[in-house]
Structures are given as C-alpha cells and as structure tokens.
Image (spheres, rainbow, N blue to C red):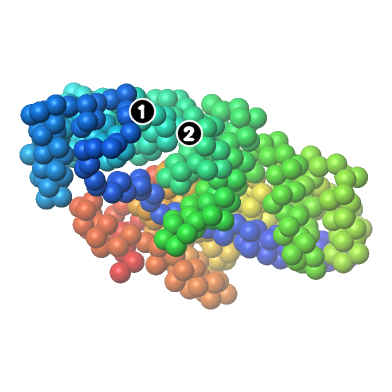
Amino acid sequence: MKNSKTLVFFTFFFIFINLVFFQHCTPKVAEEMTLPKEEKEEVVTNNNPKSVCSTFDDLNGADKENATTAYVLYKDYIKANRYEEALPIWRTAYTLAPASNGRVKYQFDDGIKIYKYLIEKTTDEAQKKKYVDTIYQIYDKRIYCFGDEAYVNGLKAFDGYYSFQRYFDTTTVYNWFTSHIDSKGKHSEYFIVNPFSKMLYDGVVSGKIDKKQGLHYAKMVGKIVEHGLKTCKEAQCATWEIINSYAPVQLELLEGIENFYDCEYYVDKYIPLFHAYPDSCEIVNTAFGRLSSGGCDPKGKELTELAKVKSKKCYTAPESPGLARLGYDEYQKGNYKKAIQYFENFAQESKDNETKAKYYLLVAKIYYGDIKNFSKSRSYARKSAEYKNKWGEPYLLIGKLYASSGPLCGPGTGWDSQIVTWVAVDQFQYARSIDPASAAEANKLIAQYSKFMPNSEDLFFRNIKKGSTYFVPCWIQEETKVRTSD
C-alpha cells in the first residue's frame, strides 16, 4: 500500500515537473549582434557648428582643399574594398580636419574599419597590438572632438569583447559596458546588451561580480530590452526580438544562484504570468516556489493569493510520510537543494531500479529547471539511465540541456550558439533509437533544432567540412559530426 501511494505521488509530481520545466525553459539560439551602420556621408564646408577639433572652416587655402578632397577620395577606396590605398588618404583627412564639417563622425568609423582590415591581414602579433592601440586612440579622439563618451564606451566594449579579447582584461571591458549603461540607462544601445549579459553572467557565476551589483545590472538589462521592444520601429524591432531571445534567457540562468534574485524580481516575472493563467496549476506551483525561494513574505499579498489558489484548485501531496513527501514539501517552498536531498535519499533507499531511475531523473530536471546547473543535471540524467535500460527520456533531457547552452557557451554569436545543436540532435537521435516511446518527441525536437545548425557558408568560411568530426567545448566537452541547416 505504501509503495502504491508513493508511485501515485511520483506519477503526478513527475508529470508536473515535466510540464513546468519544459514549458518555461525553452532552449534559445542567439544570433550575432552588429555595430550600427556608419552615418550618412556628407562633406559640407560652411555654416557648421564649432568643435574643439579642427573642421574644414578652421583651415585655409591648400589645407582646406586637401582635406575636403581627401574625405571624398578615401571613401571611394573604402567602397572598393581597397583599404591599404585608402589609409594614407584617410590619414590626410583625419589629420587636417578630424572633426570634418563639425557634424559627421563617420571618419572615425572608417579609420577603425581600415585598421581592423590591417589586423586581419598581418600575422605579426606586435603589429596587431599597435593597430589595436590605434583603434582605441581613434575612439578617444572621437570623444575629444564630439563628446558622448558613454556611446563610444559602448563601441569600445563591443570591440573589446568580440574582436580584441586578448588585448584587454575583462575588468576593463566590463567597466566600459557599465559606464555606458550607467549613463544611458534604459536607453542603452542595442549592440551592448547581448555581450554584456554574457559577461555579467560569467562574472556573477565566477564570483568576480558581487551579487548586489550583479542584480542591479541584471535588472537594468531587463529594462533596456523592455524599452527597446516598446519603442522600436520597423527593422529595429527584428533586432530587439533577437536580443530578447538571448539576454533574458542568459540572465534567467542566474536564478540558479542561491539568493541572487530578490522577491521583487520573482514577483515581476511570475505574478503577471499567474494573473494571465490563474487556472493553471503548473504556473501556480511554479510561481509559489519561485517567490518562496526569493524570500518573499509568506504572509504577503502575492504568496497569500498563490497559497489560496493552490489549496483550492491545485493538487495537494498525499498525507503518507516519507522522503518523497518531504522532498515535495521542500520543493513547494522553493527549497530546491533540500528537495533534491530528500529525493536522492529516497532513490538510494529504494530497492526498485525503476523508482531509482525516475527519481534520479526528477533530480536532473530540478537541476535543469530551477537550479540551472546543466552539468549536474546531465550527471543525474545519465545516472537515471543506468537503472532503466532502453529509456529515452534521460537523453531527451540531455539534448535539451545542450540545445539550451547557446547562452552559456558563447557570447551570443551565431556560430557558438549554433554548434550546440549538433550534440543536442545526437542525443535526440539516440533517444529515438533505443526507445520507441520517445520517438515522437525526439523527431519533433530534431526538426526544431536542425534548422538552427550552421549553414554551408558558415562551414566554408571556417574551412570545416560537412561530415567531419568536431569537438564542442564549454561544459559539454563532446565530439560530434558537422551538419548544416541547408
């Protein structure tokens, strides 16, 4: 009788975990952000605002003519991708009239574009370093001539993160990002959001960024994305949708760090969801657990309302005592680590291998959905598979872990986010091959994630052959076969 009650309890709870976690932890694949396009070209030589740097109007005679001519000529060379020929002419323009007509700033972007080209062309590391130094001198000159230090610091941070990581320590790049955000707030530029989110996550997880500061900037990122989505126009909205598919997912992973997010964060996130779906016990239970884990007052308005709905509409755990019941109780309170201890002890004490398998998989799902520790989730999924032969569910979970790892294993670029789909599909295919009951879901997931694989052009530029062996790094650390979406 006792075993019967335990199995009834497990059946419901297992279904509950499966529904909640897989609805709210949908894997995302991020796309690469790019810097804004250069400003409209214009060369005007009169009636222009003054600048602390030389403009055309500050020059006389031959110098004025040489400067205006150089501005036109170097642009023609850049349009033809003849950067080396453009360089000396750009230098003439930049030296004589760095502020151009006092309005346009594209000359700084053009100079940086030329030096980035030169960096790609040389194998001399010392020369590369000189070119990088020159690029950042151009950034500083732009600030001197036109101000807007916050915006330019965003550009510095973007390049420092994506292009020049080896030349700057993480603290320097992080400070450029935060300087930009501190100044611009919710109006921060779109191109800083994804890389900063990744850097913030890494810093908090490693302990290099304290929780208080991390929480402040995590909330700021949320406000930036929300503002961008609300105020975007036409093509801008597609970019903000890409950002929204990456940054919030990246920072949501910080929910797994104990005492990181506060009650306010969980209220803002889950109470609107609860109000939208007040009859969904999955959402009610999830919201109750998250608010409890965030330290919300048990007698406060939100938890009181959730508790009332839980007791009236939603499932109540069986009265029979035991480790499984204790684990369920702790889970409902948002004490996920205590819940895991009880469930694991229950599995260890059980003499039934199928019960062991199911409870170890339950622990794996809690590590995935609540604690956000993907490595431990995989470990327990593999452990569950040891106790039940030809069972596809553990491998479906591992595949979802891999598919969700784009934000963990890269800065948000297409390639680093996409290659995790190879190992994810490997797991889905294996689940399908050993367990017919998993085939339908596996096929659905394979179709879903195969379209996010790199395409043939991506492989061509990286000199990688389709069908070759590729090692996926990060926490995954597995070999796979190269495939394409086309």
Q: Quadrant of residue 205?
A: top right
Residue 243 is left or right of residue 386, and the answer is left
Q: Quadrant of residue 441?
A: bottom right
**Mark 1 — residue?**
143
Q: Quadrant of residue 271?
A: bottom right
Helix, strand or loop under label 1: helix
The residue mark sitting in front, 1 or 2, is 1
**Mark 2 — residue?**
180
Above or below, 426 relative to 331 = below
C-alpha span from label 1 to label 2 = 13 Å
Question: Does label 1 or label 2 sit earlier along the sequence?
Answer: 1
Helix, strand or loop under label 2: helix
How far across and how far down the image is residue 43, in percent? 21, 42
Q: Nearer the viewer, residue 299 or 275?
A: 275
At x 46%, y 51%, the residue is 406
Residue 2 is left or right of residue 242, and the answer is right
Q: Nearer the viewer, residue 101 or 246?
A: 101
Q: Amino acid at mark 2?
A: His
